[in-house]
Image (cartoon, rainbow, N blue to C red):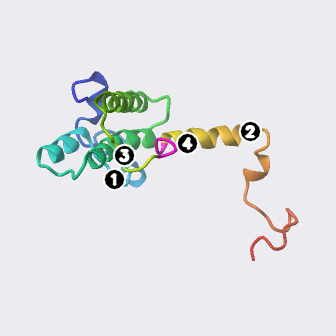
Amino acid sequence: LMRKTDARPFLEPVDPQADDLPDYAKVIKQPTDLSNVQERLREGGYSSVPDFSANLRRVFSNAMSYFKPEHNTYKAARRLRRIFADTCTELGLQTQRASTVGEWPHDYLVLVKRLTKNKDAAPFLRPVDAERDSCPDYAK
């Protein structure tokens, strides 16, 4: 993965100041990068394939959480995530401890966007006002 052109933004830790991402540390609580993953792998710092996989996927999910879907870094993360998943499938590696419904956070963000655009979503797009919505027992 590190040799892929798409990997360039992920080869070293994000430097919020140098990379002009001033709110990065506020948004991303567990930053990591490919050099960190590689170093930890060389040092035997992973207890299992799922442990390694989770940390590697965090590189991509961080980018996909921080950047908008139209940003090149987001797109690169998505492509690398797919390459990783395809390679693991080809090798028959179990990369997750338990099955999941989707890839966090991207698939869930897409789901929420689709739900909010649904014609029947309007009542759920604002907080409940017990008085206005005639739900006197709501807050109890």
Callout 2: few (<14), some (14-19), or many (20+) C-alpha neighbours within 10 Å?
few
Q: As shown in the figure, which amino acid type bears the numbered disc 2?
A: Asn
Above or below, 111 against 78 in this view is below
Q: Look at the image and say whether residue 133 sits in the magenta stretch.
A: no
- Secondary structure category for the residue under label 1: loop
Q: Earlier in the sequence, mark 2 or mark 4?
A: 4
Marks 3/1: CA–CA distance: 19 Å
**Label 2, on which residue?**
118
- Secondary structure category for the residue under label 4: helix
**Nearer the observer, disc 3 or disc 1?**
3
Give the magenta range.
Answer: 100-105
Callout 3: few (<14), some (14-19), or many (20+) C-alpha neighbours within 10 Å?
some
- The picture places residue 99, in percent across and down from the top left corner, at 45, 46
Marks 2/3: CA–CA distance: 32 Å
In the rendered image, the residue lying farthest to the top is 5
**Label 3, on which residue?**
96
Q: Earlier in the sequence, mark 2 or mark 3?
A: 3
Question: Dividing the image into 4 quarters, which one contains the C terminus?
Answer: bottom right
> Toward the viewer: 98 or 15?
98
- The picture places residue 57, in percent across and down from the top left corner, at 35, 41
- Secondary structure category for the residue under label 2: loop
> Toward the viewer: 5 or 91?
91
Q: Earlier in the sequence, mark 4 or mark 3?
A: 3
**Label 1, on which residue?**
30
